[in-house]
Image (cartoon, rainbow, N blue to C red):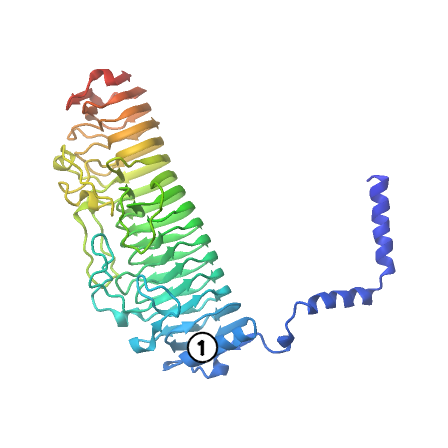
Amino acid sequence: MTIQESSAQLSRRAWLGKVSVPALTLAAAGMISAKVPENAAKSAIYDVRDYGAKGDGKTLDTAAIQAAIDACNAAQGGTVLIPAGVFMSGTLQLKSNITFYLSAGGKLLGSPKREDYTAGKGVPSGNGNIVFLYAVNAERLSIEGKGSIDGNGLAFYNGKGDNTGPGQKGIDGNFDRPHLLIFYQCTELRLHNTFLQASAYHCIRLLQCKQVYIDGIRIYNRVNKNNDGFHFSSCQYVHITNCDVQCQDDACALFGSNKFVTVTNCSFSTRWSIFRFGGGESQNIAVSNCLIYDTYGCPIKISAGRASIENFSFSNIIMKNVTGPIGIGFSGTSNNNQGNNPPAGKSFIRNISFNGIRASVVAVPVPHPDIHFELNFKEGEKNSCITLNAMDDCYLENISFTDVHVTYAGGGTLAQAGKHDVPKIAAEYFGVWDTAPGGPPAYGLYARNVKGLTLQNVRFELENDDSRPAIVFENVQDAAINGLSVQGSTSAPSLLRIVNSKDLLFTATRVLTPCQVLLSLEGPSNEGVQIDGGDLRKAIKQVAYSGGANENSLKLRT
């Protein structure tokens, strides 16, 4: 310690010695009292029973619960308590500065009667705005506690969905049913530790919200069609952690212009997709440390007509029993059926990375035993693969796969592997293959119109024989493939198929099981294809040329 530091320390001690303890205590008390509202003497807990709620599971407690919410908001904040009991209600409006707390034995149960619900005041009508709980322009709003919110959604099942899928445009769709939660233009929204279940429609819709913190939420939503988990539209600064989601439709849909979103330490299962993106300017999104299981319709799905999508990271993800498992489709033309405004400038999808992925892919989707209605499976979902699909003058740019290991069920046929025109469909990954001969022409990865593709330590394996190539590239430019390990089959025409692509470098490639041909090079526009080293011993033949392919376009060094 220097002399100057010692002097300074002594001077502080001397100063403190001259200040009496009562003076400090009064000063501290003054600081605290300045922050306490005038009505602090009153209880900050607004127990809904004090406002007339019965909690018997039969009486409609809407008016009493809303009265507690209104009183809490009028007092500039506090906690609205749902104590032990079953409190049945219709539409409720949450407001600023409120913690809506569900005790461990408390359940908020949705009324089974449609007349007990209204549209949220000020909530946009897209995908319907009938709702159980909602908030508009609220700040510092929380829903917390180990109790539950039950939407009683089975009471609203009529066999019809909203028909907002590709090409349906919502025609004759069922929108007259309540979402569980809708938040519109809310700021500093927190959802903690609560169990949400059985919505009649989407579970949680967040529209144009900012500073959203979701932690420890459990969702079980499998009683009705379009039973989404989280559904975001144009939100910013969203952080989802430690959640468990089992639903029937999209588990975490992000439409519109979502930015600065993180999802980590969560588990998901659904019939359709987990992370679904489409349209708008969706940028700067990171997903990590997640478990995905029993999911069909593609766990990670990016499908856009016109969009500005960039800077997505998916890392440390385990997928068990899925179809897909990754699908990116892009047409660059308007495909706006979600009510989102397409970007005004040039559209793009770029800078997407997949790191540390382990996946097992089933041959066909498997019905979930706890979904009571029949699910239709698409032809293109069978024998699925990773799909990167752009078209015409549009490209996917800078897509990377690092440390990715996928085990496929196999069973693909020669008809699938045959040379045929792949339809130009980008709305859904499986839509690309619905009109093809029973599915995709590759068992591992199909890529079309991709610039800047990187594969580093990627391994594709099979449980059963497959008569398709492991990888098909069509019009792929600037690709670096290092440490690729793939299983082959003597029934497949080739292990790798490259069509009209250029500037591809394969290094340290390993052929794990025998195959007839290592590489099928097709088309007159191939250029700068190099295979440099590796373990290629199990390929009976190195190269086959067709469709006007030139031998000068390939450099092979074994």
Question: Residue 407 appears at what percent x and percent y?
Answer: 28, 39
Q: Nearer the viewer, residue 287 or 206?
A: 206
Q: Which residue is located at x 34 percent, y 73 percent?
A: 118
Question: Residue 257 appears at what percent x and percent y?
Answer: 39, 50
Q: Which residue is located at x 25 percent, y 26 percent?
A: 501
Q: Which residue is located at x 52 percent, y 77 percent?
A: 71
Q: Quadrant of residue 527?
A: top left
Residue kind at label 1, given as amino acid type: Gln
Relative to 367, say whether 155 is above or below. below
Q: Quadrant of residue 331?
A: top left
Question: Dot 1: few (<14), some (14–19), or many (≥20) neighbours within 10 Å?
Answer: many
Q: Nearer the viewer, residue 148 or 401?
A: 401
Q: Secondary structure at mark 1?
A: helix
Question: Residue 247 appears at what percent x and percent y?
Answer: 32, 59
Q: Is residue 119 visible?
A: yes
Question: Residue 412 appears at what percent x and percent y?
Answer: 17, 38
Relative to 175, say whether 56 is above or below. below
Q: Quadrant of residue 172?
A: bottom left
**Residue found farthest to the front:** 344
Determine which residue is flagged by label 1: 66
Q: Is residue 113 visible?
A: no
